[in-house]
């Protein structure tokens, strides 16, 4: 029987008092697996929470980071599936590539990636899980480059499983794309839209074709906002909530988990001027 970790609204609202600039979106889905959440933790607290969740058989399935005032904070989602996961933070792309090789040699697969900038430094967060699946992580500087890369890697049997947009130290929006080797009959798809209305219209057509959203990302590129989604063949229903300030998102999250019997599976944080 499913058990959900539901934070009280009072706790969520209190945590949101720090928020002055971020807006949040969430993807909710039907699930029979228990999910646990952590919001607005510093790095040391996140590491401690990850160690605790790992010991209890919870896999880290989503990691997000945002700046609130002068503080760098982290959000995380765990799923109780009896699996294991390892969280690492690397400074710079070269260190990420080196760590990926080390983890692959130890039979770990990168499962989730996040990036952020502090001054002139870039930091990468990555989650690894046990496995030997061939995988690649790419960093692209344009949507056209991402689209071409996605097509070329698809011909090699690699399908995109995670996408992140972040402001690099050169001041431009870069894209991080994580690919896993999959069977020939398995495909994932990318869609980008300039507004939520057209995004949801496209999403409804994909749902009718048997494809469901599994990753939601919003970012800004050259002064314009974009919404992107990754799709794969699934049957479980889903719901998107956002873009909302933390207090409003926290309230709707609590109501959705309690009343609609859904779980939060993917969170996106969008800086708002």
Image (tube, helix red, strand yellow):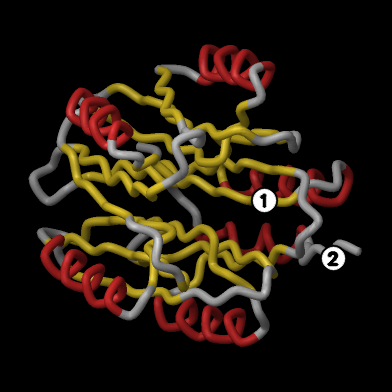
Residue plotted at (56% across, 40% down): 214
Question: In the depicted view, which residue is nearer to us: 165 or 13?
Answer: 165
Total numbered labels: 2
Q: Position of residue 166 (x, y in %)?
A: 27, 45
Q: Position of residue 119 (x, y in %)?
A: 15, 59
Q: Secondary structure at mark 2?
A: loop
Residue 89 circle label: none
Residue 179 in view: yes
Query: In the rendered view of the protein, which quadrant contains the C terminus?
Result: top left
Looking at marks 1 and 2 on the same chain, the residue that comes earlier in the sequence is marked by: 2
Residue position for label 1: 264
Residue 68 in view: no
Give the side of residue 193 with respect to residue 123, left or right: right
Residue with the most extreme front position: 184
Dot 2 alpha-carbon crowd within 10 angstroms: few under 14, some 14 to 19, many 20 or more:
few
Question: In the depicted view, which residue is nearer to us: 67 or 63?
Answer: 63
Give the side of residue 234 with respect to residue 174, left or right: right
Residue position for label 2: 3
Residue plotted at (28% across, 38% down): 156
* Mark 1–mark 2 distance (CA, rounded to whole Å): 13 Å
Residue plotted at (32% across, 55% down): 135
Dot 1 alpha-carbon crowd within 10 angstroms: few under 14, some 14 to 19, many 20 or more:
many
Q: Position of residue 163 (x, y in %)?
A: 37, 42
- The quadrant where residue 204 appears: top right
Query: In the rendered view of the protein, which quadrant contains the N terminus?
Result: bottom right
Residue plotted at (54% across, 67% down): 60
Q: Secondary structure at mark 1?
A: strand
Question: In the depicted view, which residue is nearer to us: 96 or 196?
Answer: 96
- The quadrant where residue 10 appears: bottom right
**Marks 1 & 2, CB-CB < 8 Å contact:** no
């Amino acid at each position: 029987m499913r058990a959900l970790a539901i934070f009280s609204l009072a706790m969520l609202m209190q945590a949101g008092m720090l928020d002055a600039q971020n807006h949040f979106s969430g993807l909710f889905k039907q699930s029979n697996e228990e999910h646990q959440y952590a919001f607005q933790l510093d790095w040391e607290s996140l590491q401690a929470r990850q160690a605790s969740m790992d010991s209890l058989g919870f896999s880290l399935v989503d990691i997000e980071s945002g700046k609130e005032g002068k503080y760098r904070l982290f959000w995380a989602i765990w799923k109780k599936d009896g699996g294991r996961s390892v969280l690492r933070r690397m400074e710079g792309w070269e260190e990420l590539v080196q760590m990926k090789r080390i983890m692959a040699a130890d039979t770990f697969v990168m499962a989730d990636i996040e990036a952020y900038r502090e001054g002139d430094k870039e930091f990468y967060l990555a989650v690894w899980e046990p496995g030997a699946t061939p995988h690649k992580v790419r960093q692209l500087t344009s949507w056209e480059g991402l689209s071409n890369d996605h097509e070329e890697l698809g011909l090699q049997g690699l399908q995109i499983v995670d996408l992140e947009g972040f402001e690099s130290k050169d001041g431009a929006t870069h894209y991080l794309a994580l690919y896993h080797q999959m069977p020939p009959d398995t495909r994932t798809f990318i869609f980008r839209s300039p507004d939520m209305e057209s995004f949801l219209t496209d999403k409804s057509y994909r749902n009718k074709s048997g494809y469901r959203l599994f990753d939601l990302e919003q970012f800004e590129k050259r002064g314009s906002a974009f919404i992107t989604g990754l799709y794969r063949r699934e049957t479980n229903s889903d719901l998107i909530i956002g873009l909302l300030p933390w207090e409003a998102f926290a309230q709707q999250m609590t109501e959705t988990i309690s009343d609609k019997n859904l779980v939060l599976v993917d969170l996106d944080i969008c800086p708002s001027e």
